[in-house]
Image: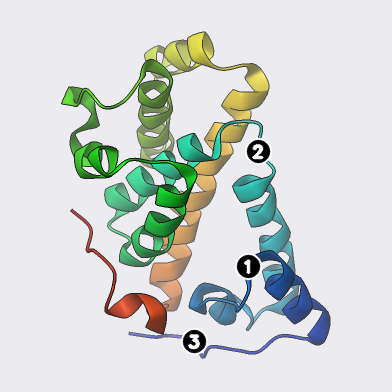
Amino acid sequence: MRRVPLAGFEPALQKRLEALWGNPVNLYRALGNAPKLAAAWTEFAQAIRADGATPRKLRELMILRGAQLVNSEYEWAQHLRMARTAGVSEAQIAALSGWRDATVFDVRERAALALCEAVTAGRVPDAVYDEAMRQFSHAQYVELSLVAAFYAMVARVLDALGVPLDDDIVDHSPRLP
């Protein structure tokens, strides 16, 4: 159930959103009710999504896993397309909920998925940190931690605002496994 109206944007923010992603999706239109926060969110999301030092594929795997963990249909539907574009395989998508037992994830992907689960749960055990540090630099660890935390927040905001799936996704979106 939608809890806030889908808003328009001031011209500068509308132009920025279109330059980054084309027509603003419902999440951004819901955020448009708080224009300053929507603008800040846009730049932070852009930094996480497009300006990362880690491979986009790795970040998209984490985003999809986070969507599964918090049962976010919207986040899953939006990022499924992005994940495929970034090189996440259909086998990885199908195996994601049971990644620990799947053979389609390499050691770096496993470390990132474990970190995603720990950050989403709100506590990173030493063993998860230790394995992440064997695979990633400190800068990459910070980046991946922010990816997991940001997209956990995204899911919570989507729920709080009652953001509906975008029309172009409603009939074409595979549901969460």
Q: Which amino acid lies under the numbered mark 2 shown in the image of this protein?
A: Gly
Residue that extends furthest to the right in the rendered view of this protein: 12
2 vs 3, front mark? 2
Gap between marks 1 and 3 measured at Cα: 22 Å
The residue carrying mark 2 is 52
Mark positioned earlier in the residue sequence (2 or 3): 3
1 vs 3, front mark? 1
22 on left or right of 11: left
Gap between marks 2 and 3 measured at Cα: 31 Å
The residue carrying mark 1 is 21
Nearest to the observer: residue 48 or residue 82:
82
Is 62 situated above or below 168? above
Q: Residue at x 54, y 80 (%)?
A: 30
150 on left or right of 168: right
Q: Residue at x 40, y 50 (%)?
A: 84
Residue 85 appears in view: yes
The residue carrying mark 3 is 4
Mark positioned earlier in the residue sequence (1 or 2): 1
